[in-house]
Image (cartoon, grey):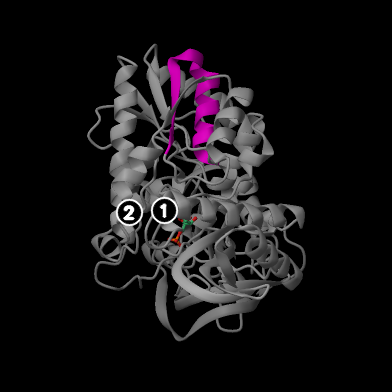
Amino acid sequence: MSQREAVVILDFGSQYSQLIARRVRELEVYCELIPYNAPAEQITRLNPLGFILSGGPASVYAKDAPHLPDVVLNSDKPVLGICYGMQLLTYHLGGKVDPGAEREYGPADIDIINADVPLFGRVEGRQLPVWMSHGDRVTELPAGFRPLAKSKNSPYAAIGHPERGLYGLQFHPEVTHTPQGKELLRAFLVDVCGCSGGWTAGNFIDESTAQVRAQVGSGQVVCGLSGGVDSSVVAALLHRAIGDQLTCIFVNTGLMRQDEPQQVVQTFEKEMHARLIAVDATEDFLGALAGVTDPEAKRKIIGEKFVRIFEAEARKLGQVDFLAQGTLYPDVIESASRDEQKVAAKIKTHHNVGGLPEDMHFQLVEPLRYLFKDEVRAVGEALGLPKEIVWRHPFPGPGLAVRLLGDITWERLETLRAADAIFIEELWASGWYHRTSQAFVVLLPVQSVGVMGDYRTYGNVAAIRAVTTDDFMTADWARLPADLLARVSNRIVNEVAGVTRVVYDISSKPPATIEWE
Ligand code: XMP
């Protein structure tokens, strides 16, 4: 059983469940988000100091409504039910929940009517702006519970049984639209559950170094290095844990950005000192992609090719037992809750170059599988990785292949690389690189007429794309200043042979995706 201080968040399907976990982690308390119907052992192994029940779309009286597992009902640990979680707690402890006369959605104010409880010990004021999103509502409290706050539409906007450490909030403390939400969560974790906090990147490194050593013993580990933050952090962490038992393999697909392959190798050698095998497979990839224009076909070819090359290199190393991967917590959560419908609605096959070759018989080492992206970055910084790696925009596994619409040829790749390098350089120079989450150039498979000097030209169209996003699930186009756009456009048309027109992509996601293919 775990000795580490932890809280369990039970997921009842709210769109905000991951956000609760991120908030709790920001408060330096380790937590895991676990599906409400997971085996009890998955919960008890963490020896949690308390439970948070997420919201969810169901109604407690609905047939097949998610229920509160016995392991929570039989525990004497504190529980915080949020929205559906509060209704569930009420229902299971003998109170009453009814359909609300109308859905309450959006901003609301709550009046605290009973401030003298630990949950409210850290908030300021008696009236709090909050974010509501619910249909049903509690109409009768279970024995021992008191109303703690009310809103215009909810007589029980917050309820509690402070002696038992049980609380319910009809609103969402995890979203930023509830400005004092973090203080409510802090009060629950620290003052109600008794957590002492202190779960930081530094602690994580010590803990996971020990875990990796215990897992691999004296075995050999390979790790695919892409140059992105996740694989770099995995490599640095593993090198710290097991030194020369780690070999990194970097495959240059020929689909990387300007100077990127050299930079990855140089940075790696300078900063990490681990064993690295760099393979230039450009010709292999370009050969396999010749004449292929369908985006899914491109992804499939690249994914398979990568696996074969990685496998061949790993074989040369002799006996290797483990494959290290940069799987992150959102991937783990996503695959745990993936149902058939979600799989059926898949929009793109995401091939993670550097991902698991499925038919290789390695055991997996996934030291980041309980971390969110921002935590991976914090770990990267704590490990001393350079800022350019830690704060790099993500780059898709299939690389420039999905930004080169139409045929993939070396010449077109070089055009794209040159245009992309100008855009990124201008973003850095203007201080906009870190104000965008991802930015790149796409080369379109159309020709357009232009005029240069006294001559008519007929050349390529380059689209520039820059987005802001927290989670890459939704995104907005970045409002880059007009003079920056003008500079980028001018430079691309003047400096990149064959490009005569530049357009700026002003689509948000949804309905567009971030990449064009
Ligand atoms: P979309 O285009 O689906 O992209 O809005 C969301 C994020 O995922 C990245 N992306 C990929 N990453 N393999 C990857 O490893 C892929 O095949 C792939 N396709 C898109 C994209 O760059 C963005 O960050």
Which residue is the site of mark 1?
401
Sequence-wise first label, 2 or 1: 2
Q: Classify mark 2: residues with Cα within 10 Å, few (<14), some (14-19) or many (20+).
A: some
Disc 2 residue type (three-letter): Lys
Q: CA distance from mark 2 to mark 1?
A: 7 Å
Taking the magenta stretch, the answer to whether it contains residue 249 is yes
Q: Which residue is mark 2?
A: 298
Quadrant containing the C terminus in the rendered view: bottom left
Task: Assess whether mark 1 and mark 2 are in contact (beta carbons under 8 angstroms).
Answer: yes
From the top left corner, tell me how far across and down residue 102 is, in percent: 47, 87
Identify the amino acid type marked 1.
Ala
Which residue range is magenta in the image?
A: 229-252
> In this rendering, would 457 be left or right of 337?
right
Is 368 part of what is drawn in magenta?
Answer: no
In the foreground, 220 or 422: 422
Task: Give the overall secondary structure of the magenta segment.
Answer: helix
- Where 207 falls versus 347 (above or below)? above
Q: Which mark is residue 465?
A: none
Q: Quadrant of ligand 1?
A: bottom left
Looking at the image, which residue is at 58% across and 50% down?
393
Look at the numbered disc 1 and say if its residue's Cβ is closer than 8 Å to ligand 1: no
Above or below, 277 against 79 in this view is above
Q: Quadrant of the N terminus?
A: top left
User: Quick check: 184 above or below 83?
Assistant: above
